[in-house]
Amino acid sequence: MSPYKSLEEYNFEITAEVQERYSRIIDEIGEDVNREGLVKTPERAAKAMLFLTQGYKQDAVEILEGAMFKEDYDDMVIIKDIELYSLCEHHMLPFFGKAHIAYIPNGHIVGLSKIPRVVDVFARRLQVQERLTHDILECINNTLKPKGVAVVIEASHMCMMMRGVQKQNSVTTTSGFRGQFEKQETRNEFLKLISSKLS
Ligand SMILES: [Zn+2]
């Protein structure tokens, strides 16, 4: 099975079921599901939700293993400013921001485009930012087995911005470090290299 399933391959019955439930939600909130602008909304919303949660059907380990190369390079590799869009599992509202990821190879490097793909696999699920950070960290650590890996995520949460405390400008930062990044010196070097982008 390809890890990059396109939306068209999604199960028709599941899409129809989700569509039906969205239709009932629209009705329950007092709208007219038959109004012109809303006629196709349940179908669009169902497809959007299935797209945004397609990570459940994807395998991040497979993505990394498919692009690992033997290489002696053993300095820090940093991928900064990886765009990230996810859904908070408490409200099913978006949270979005950036991920900064570094690793120190231990005999193998990985194709650079695969790291953002790993972010997407875990982000396209119902998540909390803390677990998302941990999922990415452990996946890279266990699959690539580098000398060290670091993950920093900074994100804004719509559930905080649009409802509840309504803190429009707050950014949540989470981080995780394994191996050589657990040493203060290495961790500081990484944080310094990404700090120009940290808010
Ligand atoms: Zn939330």
Image: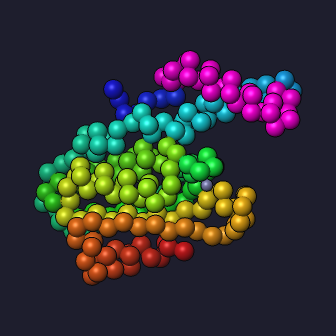
Quadrant containing the N terminus is top left
Question: At which x and y percent is residue 110?
Answer: 25, 51
Q: Is residue 172 visible?
A: yes
Question: At which x and y percent is residue 143?
Answer: 23, 49
- Segment tinted magenta in the rendering: 8-33
- Viewer-side residue, 1 vs 162: 162
Please name the residue shown 22% across and 67% down the image: 179
State the image quarter where residue 26 is shown: top right
Please name the residue shown 43% across and 47% down the image: 122
Where is 146 relative to 29, above or below? below
Quadrant containing the C terminus is bottom right
State the image quarter where residue 20 is shown: top right
- Side (left or right) of 101 relative to 129: left
- Viewer-side residue, 166 vs 7: 166
Question: At which x and y percent is residue 24?
Answer: 75, 28
Q: Per the image, is 12 magenta?
A: yes
- Viewer-side residue, 110 vs 93: 93
Please name the residue shown 27% across and 73% down the image: 182
Q: Main secondary structure of the magenta part?
A: helix
